[in-house]
Image: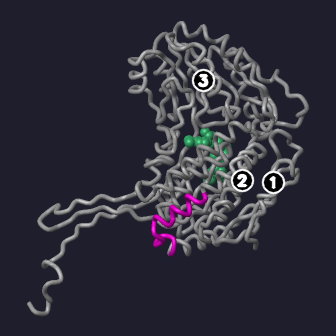
Amino acid sequence: MQSSNTMGEAASPAAGTATELRNLVGGSWSAGRGQAVTLYNPADAKAEVARFTYSTQDDVRDAVTAAERAFVEWRSTPIVKRCRILAHCKELLEQHRMEIARLIVIENGKTLGEAEAEVRRGLEVVEFAAGMPSLSKGDYIPDISGRIDGYMLREPLGVVVGACPFNFPAMIPMWMFPVAIACGNTFVLKPSEKCPMTATRLVELFQEGGLPAGVLNVLQGDRETFAAMIAAEPVRAVSFVGSTPAAEAVWKLAGSHHKRVQALGGAKNHNIVMPDADPQGAVNAVVGAAYGCAGERCMATSTVVLVGEAGKLLPGLIDAARSLRMGDGLETETTLGPLISAAHRDRVLEYLELGQREGAKLVLDGREASTDGLPDGHFLGASIFDQVTPEMRIAREEIFGPVLCVMRAADLDEAIALANQSEFGNGASIFTNSGGAAQHFRTNIEVGMIGINAGVPAPMAMFSFGGHKNSIYGDLRAQGPDAIEFYTQKKTVIERWFGTGPTGSIWSK
Ligand code: NAD
């Protein structure tokens, strides 16, 4: 057992040595007792970045028990005190902001600028959570009936568990545990097994920032680890973000154990460009949304629908996508980082072949792009398919890579109908100069997050984040007001007092 995970020393990519990751259980760091795993830098698959072991059923039991014990004190710690600790943690994270961003780059591959933006989004959730005293106040109606008061108060649930995807190793953990903890719960986090370094470092910083032992725990592991966490008896609620099949499996498993669950899944997001849109603004936004984070974003634009004369924008889209510079995310000139793994790159390559077999026209082939001096990275250049039709698999399935599908529509209603055919409903955007078109789009598009002249309509921390249809299982979304709703249960009280107070003794009556 150790009191520190020693991540701080190895957080610098210059260190060149793999970081040993551990579990944090009840305030002590120790290795999981399961299978050993080594992770490599996606920009250089020969460079080891982390080693760790998966957690076993016993590790899960220990962590959940530690969280259950810590809940007794934590729930009765005054909310202002809980939030003061979180505010202090946030200051610590600010001091380590660049170190966290560099960790994201070396384990995930995205560019440093993208990583910095991700850390900022996560920090905003911590800021939001630190305001919990004002945010989670109950309701009170005096004299709701003759000398009767009615009120509602919120209380924490108990032990909450969360599992995260690989693509936002800092932001998505911070969607979960800061809000849960501010509400008085204790938390067991399972980072992505593909990108666990950043989340583990965050947990270490929250420990250093003053969270009492057992309030925040971390378990390294895979889907089996998380299934064991969901099933563990003391666990009251399950937060999940990942692919749609996994979200559905988690939602069903949690439901079968009668656990509260929010499970956010995959996406296939559409951008509609109207003929009256600002041409350069639309091209820049679509390309940024399609290829940012190498297309590995649940808010990535995977299809652009060019309406009427907007079809003329295709050459501009091709030029802008071709000009992206592939490379190591730590290099300042890089605008397109590698994919997460060789297996994932192979999967995206299969979609390029599939699209051609399905009859789409590959007008920009990312396989032709190259990187200098990085032969072992999982790089793939930007690709564009034109003449994509809705029945094609490349139009329907989440590719999660730097591939943009182009569809054409005669008018806005046809474009909306194309987007609404998707089984997913995460985000969608319109580019137009018409308020009427934007309103029509907002009303009729079937997604949870809408952009108007904005390519990536990801809500900030004060709003909740989540989609519709197969992009979510469960009713409450991540961060913002839904998160408070999710991490608390309500009690309503009807209160009546007999007599008028301390003037008389009941014994004298
Ligand atoms: P993934 O589904 O493979 O894994 C996500 C997490 O779930 C991991 O921690 C993994 O260990 C766990 N897991 C996987 N299958 C499980 C199962 N059957 N039971 C229990 N746990 C399981 O996803 P990924 O490849 O890491 O991430 C990419 C996916 O996440 C994409 O589909 C993307 O759209 C989605 N995503 C969605 C959002 C959103 O807000 N909707 C945000 C980010 C990523």
Say which amino acid is labelled 1. Answer: Ala
Residue 342 pos. (x, y %): 80, 39
Residue picked out by circle 2: 196
Say whether residue 197 is visible. yes
Task: Name the colour scheme.
Answer: one colour
Q: Which residues are magenta?
A: 73-89
Residue 250 pos. (x, y %): 56, 52
Say which amino acid is labelled 3. Answer: Ala
Q: Residue at x 84, y 36 (%)?
A: 377
Q: Earlier in the sequence, mark 1 or mark 2?
A: 1
User: Which one is nearer the viewer's eye here, 138 or 440?
Assistant: 138
Q: Main secondary structure of the magenta part?
A: helix
Of circles 2 and 3, the one toward us is 3
Residue picked out by circle 3: 285
Of circles 1 and 3, the one toward us is 3
The residues bearing labels 2 and 3 have C-alpha atoms spaced at a distance of 30 Å
Q: Residue 204: name its quadrant.
A: bottom right
Q: Residue at x 78, y 39 (%)?
A: 343
Mark 2–mark 3 CB contact (< 8 Å): no
Residue picked out by circle 1: 50
Label 2: which secondary element: loop
Instruction: Tell me if 284 is positioned left or right of 135 in this view.
Output: right
Mark 1–mark 2 CB contact (< 8 Å): yes
